[in-house]
Image (cartoon, rainbow, N blue to C red):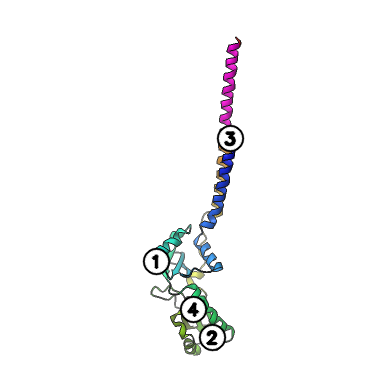
Amino acid sequence: MKKTIALLLAVLTVLLLAVPALALTGYELFTRWEQDGYPEDVTGVFYNTETQCLAILLTDNTEARQKAIRESLTDGDTLTFFPGRYSHAELEAVRDVIAADVENGEPGLVSVSIGWGSSGGYGEEKKDFRVVVKAEKESMAALAEKYADYGDLVAVEEGQAAVDTPADAMETPKERQGLSDWGIIGIAAVVAVLVAVLLTRAIDKSRAKSEIKTRGGNHARRGVGDE
């Protein structure tokens, strides 16, 4: 019995340790995408001030795709989704080309970034991302012509400051309340161990009582026979 309990505990521990890898939060998923690269159908992620949660821009903004992302997260029901025209990879590729122009001192070119412009987002819902080029006023027309082949993927506007991410995304998200995933897992593991210990003690106690009764019965029988 003890071996069985030990085996069950070992299996439970493996399953508990596997939970963080299988179930991420929205913020953890965003961090992973930033580090390992975005999926082909994701434009970007921003902090939605209306819901006070993360929002994801999808080029394949279907209910099926939304459901797949939600079900892969522990807080998937808090996400909101909006349509994105270009993938993050497409935006990055163009951003890198223009960034080289910035480094090479292109006249009038101030900065380049991915996100929203000074007036907000793009697209019908004003949430979409573009490659935002900041330029001196007198150079805006020339730079717009220079990057015209990219179409509406590039937005040229006057300004001196880069907009790396949407204004909403720059806000610090509220700290999550309650225990972290690891805290919950730790408590679950401790509870499992306590249950196993108590179960073992109960089994040992039951066996002891059984042995006592058996021994008592044997003594009684021996006493009767002796008489």
Residues under labels 1 and 4: Cα distance? Answer: 24 Å
* Rendered image: mark on residue 62: 1
Neighbours of disc 4 within 10 Å: few (<14), some (14-19), many (20+): many
* Rendered image: mark on residue 109: 2
Q: Is residue 43 left or right of residue 14?
A: left
Element marked by disc 4: strand
Which residue lies at the image location 54% right of the left edge and 84% below the top edge?
110
In the rendering, at what x and y percent does residue 45 appear? 48, 68
Q: Nearer the viewer, mark 2 or mark 3?
A: 3
At label 1, which amino acid type do we have? Answer: Thr
Q: Which residues are magenta?
A: 200-225
Q: Nearer the viewer, mark 1 or mark 4?
A: 1
Which residue lies at the image location 60% right of the left edge and 13% below the top edge?
223
Q: Nearer the viewer, mark 1 or mark 2?
A: 1
In the rendering, at what x and y percent does residue 162 appear? 53, 78
At label 3, which amino acid type do we have? Answer: Arg
For the C terminus, give its image quadrant. Answer: top right
Neighbours of disc 1 within 10 Å: few (<14), some (14-19), many (20+): few
Residues under labels 3 and 4: Cα distance? Answer: 66 Å
Mark 3 = which residue?
201
Element marked by disc 2: strand
Q: Nearer the viewer, residue 79 or 203?
A: 203
Q: Which mark is first along the chain, 4 or 1?
A: 1
Q: Which mark is first along the chain, 2 or 4?
A: 2
Residues under labels 1 and 2: Cα distance? Answer: 38 Å
Mark 4 = which residue?
131
> Do labels 2 and 3 touch, CB within 8 Å?
no
Residues under labels 2 and 3: Cα distance? Answer: 75 Å
In the rendering, at what x and y percent does residue 50 appear? 42, 66
* Rendered image: mark on residue 11: none
Dominant secondary structure (helix, strand or loop) of the stretch shown in magenta: helix
